[in-house]
Image: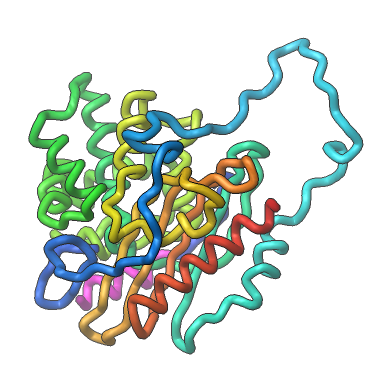
């Protein structure tokens, strides 16, 4: 654990991009099926329209007009864009955060290409790193010009849909652990994310801005991942187990969403890391949202915090 603290001190968010639960060991309790911990929200599992087996693709950033095309521009679009960071800071003012807790959130409007970020601190990923692990595996498979094996697909499904920790550990080893994750993230443009030491993948450190960058690789057009790789990840994230459909889905105004959550209780403090990342639709627009938190006294309070932050983030584009 001392090495983890040292790693955390080294990580700083040095910039913001525009578009932008661990292995169960004696020191850590992690969200996942093997953890024996579940938080069930009274929300029905989404039906048709979600990015999942229920729908094979997600909306992506609109293509720009082709060369020479005459585009109609109204006066409103000629005005300077709003300071979305300032609007998000304002929207976060009424959000209740426990003493000693911290939260960060980032949002990207897939239609306008605008983004907003609140908070630049580093957080434990807990199980949201499972998206990153699978993205790294898919990138490595592309490099080798191969498809995932049946076993890898089985691990991937259990890891994303059910947040299974044993499956995550198997794929963490397959990608080369922290070194493999860091190499992939360097190519993805994630400059403030560092893989956890040894087998502690859930103690990977990241920022909200970096998680937004990862989501852009999964849901955006400007991605190193192939169309097939992105569609595969989107499908799994849209088919999350019913007891794990809380989080950024709270910002959706319907059933169209795809996400991955992470929750982790730190044994040294008894406090909870609770995170959620994903794609939602609201008001006819598609948004990528990443919200991270730590220092929560209970998991339930952490869930409430990330959901409130996700709604606040989307509201700045309303």
Residue at x 82%, y 15% (from the top left corner): 70
Q: Does residue 268 appear left or right of residue 104 in this picture?
A: left
Residue at x 62%, y 28% (from the top left corner): 62
Residue 259: x %, y % from top left: 39, 50
* Residue projecting furthest to the top: 68
- Is 93 within the magenta? no
Residue at x 77%, y 52% (from the top left corner): 82
Q: Does residue 60 appear left or right of residue 56 in this picture?
A: right
Residue 14 at least partly seen: no
Residue 65: x %, y % from top left: 70, 19
The quarter in which the N terminus is drawn is bottom left
- Is 4 within the magenta? yes
Vertical placement of residue 48 versus 275, above or below: above
- Quarter-wise, where is residue 21 in the image? bottom left
Nearest to the observer: residue 195 or residue 274: 274
The part of the chain drawn in magenta is 1-11
Nearest to the observer: residue 231 or residue 187: 231
Q: Main secondary structure of the magenta part?
A: helix
* Residue projecting furthest to the right: 75
Vertical placement of residue 49 versus 93, above or below: above
Vertical placement of residue 313 versus 74, above or below: below
């Amino acid at each position: 654990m001392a090495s983890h603290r040292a790693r955390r001190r080294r990580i700083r968010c040095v910039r913001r991009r525009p578009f932008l639960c661990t292995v169960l060991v004696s020191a850590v309790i992690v969200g996942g099926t093997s953890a024996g911990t579940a938080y069930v929200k009274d929300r029905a599992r989404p039906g048709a329209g979600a990015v999942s087996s229920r729908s094979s693709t997600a909306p992506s950033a609109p293509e720009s007009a082709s060369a020479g095309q005459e585009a109609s521009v109204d006066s409103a679009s000629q005005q300077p864009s709003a300071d979305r960071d300032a609007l998000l800071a304002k929207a976060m003012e009424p959000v209740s955060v426990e003493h000693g807790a911290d939260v960060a959130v980032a949002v990207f409007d897939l239609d306008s290409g605008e983004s907003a970020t609140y908070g630049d601190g580093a957080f434990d990923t807990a199980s949201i790193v499972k998206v990153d692990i699978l993205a790294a595996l898919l990138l490595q498979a592309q490099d080798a010009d191969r498809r995932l094996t049946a076993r890898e697909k089985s691990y991937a499904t259990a890891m994303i849909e059910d947040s299974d920790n044993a499956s995550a550990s198997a794929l963490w080893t397959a990608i080369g652990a922290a070194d493999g994750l860091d190499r992939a993230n360097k190519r993805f443009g994630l400059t403030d994310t560092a893989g956890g030491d040894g087998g502690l993948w859930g103690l990977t450190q990241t920022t909200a801005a970096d998680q937004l960058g990862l989501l852009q690789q999964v849901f955006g057009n400007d991605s190193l991942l192939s169309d097939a790789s992105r569609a595969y990840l989107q499908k799994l994230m849209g088919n999350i187990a019913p007891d794990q459909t809380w989080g950024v889905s709270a910002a959706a105004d319907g059933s169209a969403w795809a996400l991955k959550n992470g929750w982790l209780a730190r044994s040294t403090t008894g406090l909870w890391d609770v995170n959620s990342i994903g794609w939602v639709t609201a008001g006819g627009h598609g948004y990528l949202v990443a919200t991270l938190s730590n220092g929560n006294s209970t998991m339930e309070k952490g869930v409430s915090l990330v959901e409130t932050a996700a709604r606040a983030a989307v509201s700045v584009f309303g």
